[in-house]
Structures are given as structure tokens and as C-alpha cells.
Image: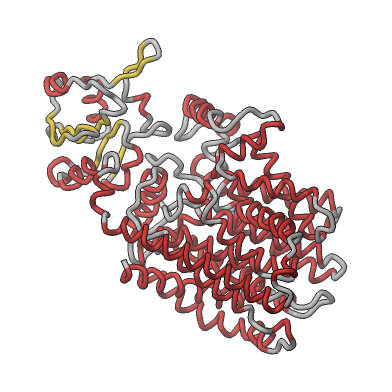
Amino acid sequence: MLAELLKISAFLALFLLHSSILGAALLPPTLHRPTRHGLPNGFLLWFFILCLGTLGNIAVLFVLGVAGQLKLPSVLAAGGILLPLSALRALPLLRALAGRRGAASKPDLTAVASLGLIFLLSVIVALHPPGHFDDTMYQLPLARHYLEHQRIALHEYLRFPLFPQNINLLFVLGLMLDGVLLAQGFASLPLFIIAVGLVGASIWMLGTSTVGIFAGALLFIIGPIKRTLGFAYVDNGLAMFCWAATLAFLLFDNERQQRKTALYWAALAGLMAGAAAGSKYFGVVLAALIGTLLLLWRRDWRATLVYSACLIATGCWWYVRSYLISGDPIHPAGGQVFGHYLWDAGDLALQAQEQDSHGVGRNPLHIAQALKEAHVLPWLGALLGVALLKVPTQLRRLQLIFILYLAFWFFVTQVSRYLAPVFAAGCFLTVYTAYRWLAWLPTQRWLPDRRQRRIAVAAFVLLLLLGFTIERFQRYEGRMKQWDALLEQTPGYSLFTHADKLKPQYGSRLVQLGFESATYWFDGLVIGDVFGRGRYRDMLICEQGRCRPVPQHLFRYLESNNAYMLAISTRQYANLDLTAFERAGFQILMQDNQGVLFGINRR
């Protein structure tokens, strides 16, 4: 466990260093020069630098993928060429930071130490076997598919092959450099970057890092993140770019009297909003919300045009690709308008039905229950914070953005992970409300000396984070030790890995029913999913609302797809008549308590 921790930490630290140098080169000098509000604090600058650098690295991976050069030598060469060029460009920023004077330039050691622990947390939570449905059903198979083809190649049998995939390219990088643990590390690393932004925002708006530190720790506790923590999901990356877009917009609003500086912040907000839109469709929602506020609230046409141009520049890649391949820029969501490609009308209807099964009724009085169902009940504090008096102006703006997106989520979809665009804002505002309430306590009576209070708070923060980090290390160390045992419990793992060994005899295609989340465990083409080209409805015989696997029909389906192995989940399709399958020409290759692996003779 310790060796893996050190190795993954080193890889991610090198990525952060590369992104820092690249991001410092990309950050416009105007944004780190003194203004009437002073120089942005170091944490806030580093946050934007990291986000810009990460976006720059993603853009390089995208270009290499389009050019068919998504392989290690090309990636290392591109990164090596960018490094010295970026370092030369970043020198003005380094000089600006080195030239800072006064009390504001003193490092916040509590924040630095806390962020160090949060970085360790981000690595620790990635050290476990994969297998949380979406990661092994879609995210990791997609990354492996790109690696195998050394380019961004369409995989028609995956559920969402044309979705925005900015964060998926980081998973490709992780698999390329080391393997699945590093890919999972790239999924959790954005939580550390978000924490840097939370600390910077806290110092900027409140003059203290405490709120930002606690908000960063809260990220690891709220349900939507905790449920998929350390698995290869894109939601944390989406949250990172959304937080960057939100803060850049707030800084635009803060600097609107300084016209040139404000336009640069609008441009940065657009770049980050585009990065979010290129990570997941819900990034488009936040991007549209910020653009609407720019236009209607500030009525600033020039800033809106700058924002929109930057948004399109970084956000259009995947949508153009989707349109060129399918005729639908938002495949499969636009099927009713642009025509169906891999998904049909029945798939879209099933998806809508599944989405409607989440959450509670749309009555606004049920908002607390909705937050409870989404496992973000502490965010009630963020909503109650609206009633607080003497709230800093930019924090009021943040409350507005949070409430507007929360309203969209509540009335349109209540899937908990779709709150990702406001993960950071919700945690920050929640901790801010608690911070204001705690300020009413008579702390001066207990610790009259201000310096003693600061030391006590710092010690409390660090001890909590240290304890949490140690507890997580012990928990995930247990998961690493039980790697094989945990995988054996994963539905379909044993059957799919056994099928993988039989590829020389039965070929590299596997048809499956009920094991879509096991796709990653077969290193070949897996056919079968609820939606898309390999939909279950085409494999099953449905009568009177009941669908069942029929051996003769499945035999013909395998032959028509040039496949010679079939895996069926006996938990999804109980009471299989194995004798009937044998009579139809199937052979039982393996059977366990989760399902059966069949084979047919190759012709």
C-alpha cells in the first residue's frame, strides 16, 4: 500500500507540476498584476493556473488522439516540448509572485499543511480495486479502447461513446503511464485542486483560510462524491472546471470597473466553462447560467461576447465530433430532433423513465427531502445562509449561482451526481454559514488572546484532517490487501476474466445479458447493454411485458454478430433452463453464483 501510495503520489505531483508551469504560461499577465483590489492571493492564482494547465494538457491529448498519436512516446514528446517553452513564458508570473511584499505575502502555513493532507487524501482514496458500475461499464473501457487504437476511435457498443470526454482523456493518460490506480487517481485529483480554489476564495472573500479548508474536507464526506470516491468517474473533474468558471465570473464582477482586467476574467470564465461543457453535459447548464448572468445582470455585451467566444473555443470539440459522426451534437439526447444513431426512441424513453425514478416530487416544499435523498443534507446550511446579514458582495453572488443551479437540478433531474457543478459552492456556503454561527460563541472569554485563538483553530483543523487521513489510509489499505477477494465479489468479474482466457478458442467478442458493469474485465468487444446498439431488447423475446432469454434466438444473435461466447446473469434472469441452452448448441464453459458463461463452436 505504501509503495503504491508513493508511486501514484509521484505521478500526480509531476502532473501538477507540469500543469502549473503550463498554466502559468497560459494565464494572462494582466490577471496577476496589481489592481485597485490588490494582487489575487497565491492560492487563488495557483488554482486558476492548475485548471488552465490541466485544460492545456487535455487539449494536447485531444489533438494527439485526433491525429492517431495517442501513445506514450508521442505524449512524452509533446509534454517535454511544452515544458521549457511554458517555463520561459511563465517567468513574469514567477517574478510577480516573488516580488510581493508585506504581511499578505507571508505563507499561510495552516492552509499549506491542510492542502498537503488533502492531496494525500486524494491519492489514498484512489487505492482500491475498480468496480462501481460506470467506471467498469463505460469510463475505463473507453479509455482502454482509445489506448488500443492509439486514437480517439468510436466504440459503438459502449453506452455513451459520443459524450463530452475531457476528463476521460486523463483516464487514458493514467492507464498509459501506470494502470488503473493512476487512472483512478486522476479522477480524485480534481478534489485537491478544488480545495486549493476553496482556500483561495476563502482568503479573498473572508480574509481567512479556515472556511476554505473545512469546505475542502467536506468534499470527501458529501454523498454524491463519497459514493464514487476514487473510482474512474468524471464528476469531480466537471466540478473543478465549474468552480473555476464560477470564481472567474465573480472576479470579473469584482473588477468590472477595471475594464481590461474584467474582460480577461470574463475570458477565463469562458475558457473554464467550456472545459466544463467538454467534460459533461451538465457543464453546459452552468456555462449557460453564467452567460445569462453576464448578459442580463450586467448587460455587458462585450464581456458576454468574449465569454462566449472562449466558451466555444474550449467547449465545442466533442460536440463537433458527435455531430460529424452521428448528425447529433448531443448524442443521444438529441435523437428526437437530429435523428437516431446508436440509440433509438425506445432507449431514450427508457432513459427518461430511469431519470424520473430519482428524488422526490417537484414541490419546492420538498427541497429538504430532496437534499436528504441526494445525501447532501448539510447543504441546507448553504440555503439558510441567504438569510444572514452583512454577507460579502461576491459571496452573495455565489449564493445566487448556487440557488439557481440547485433550482434547475430540483425541477429537471434529481440524480445526486448531477449536482457536480455546485459541489464546491455548496460545501463552501455550508461551511460559511456554520462559520458565521460559530462567530456568535463567546470564544474571547475562553481564549482572550487573538494569537492563541488562531493557534487553537489551526491545531483543531490540522488534527481533524490528520485523523481523517489516517483513518482513510487504514481503510483503503484493507481494500488493497483484499484486492482479489473484492474483485471476486464483483458481478461478472470471474466469468469475464475466464472468458478473456478463452479468446484464442472462442474469439474476442462476448455477448452478455445483465453484466454491463463488467465490461472492463473482458479485454475485447463486449456486446450488451440496456441502451444502444447492443440493447438487451434485441436479444430477448418479450411477451406480455415480460422479457426472457430464449436459447435459439440468442444462438442466432451470436452468429449474426460473429460472437461465440455468451454470459448471462442468473440474478437478473433467474431459472435459466441450462438443458435447453445445451440442446440449442451452447456449451457451459463456467458457472458460479452470479451467472453462466456459454460457448458455441466457431464456424
Relative image position of residue 73 (x, y in whole percent): 36, 71
Q: Is residue 81 above or below residue 421?
A: below
Q: Nearer the viewer, residue 191 or 109?
A: 109
Outermost residue on the top side: it is 544
Determine the residue positioned at 27% across, 54% down: 483
Residue 359 is situated, as x and y percent measured from the top left of the image, at 57, 33
Left or right: 537 as drawn, with respect to 592: right
* Quadrant of the image containing the C terminus: top left
Q: Nearer the viewer, residue 89 or 122?
A: 122
User: Is residue 220 rendered to the left or right of residue 554?
Assistant: right
The N terminus sits in image quarter: bottom left
The answer to whether residue 568 is above or below residue 278 is above
Q: Is residue 440 visible?
A: yes
The residue drawn where x is 23% and y is 20% is: 575
Q: Name the residue rendered at 39%, 54% in the picture.
A: 143
Q: Residue furthest front?
A: 445
Q: Is residue 594 left or right of residue 161?
A: left
Residue 66 visible in the shown view: no
> Residue 188 in the image: x percent, y percent?
47, 59
* In the image, residue 531 above or below residue 396: above
In-front residue for pair 547/207:
207
Among the 4 quarters of the image, the one containing residue 373: top right
State whether residue 365 is above or below residue 178: above
- Number of on-image labels: 0
Q: What is the quadrant of residue 281 in the picture?
A: top right
Q: Can you give x and y, in whole percent of width and height, for residue 127 in the image?
A: 36, 60
- Residue at 52 percent across and 37 percent down: it is 332
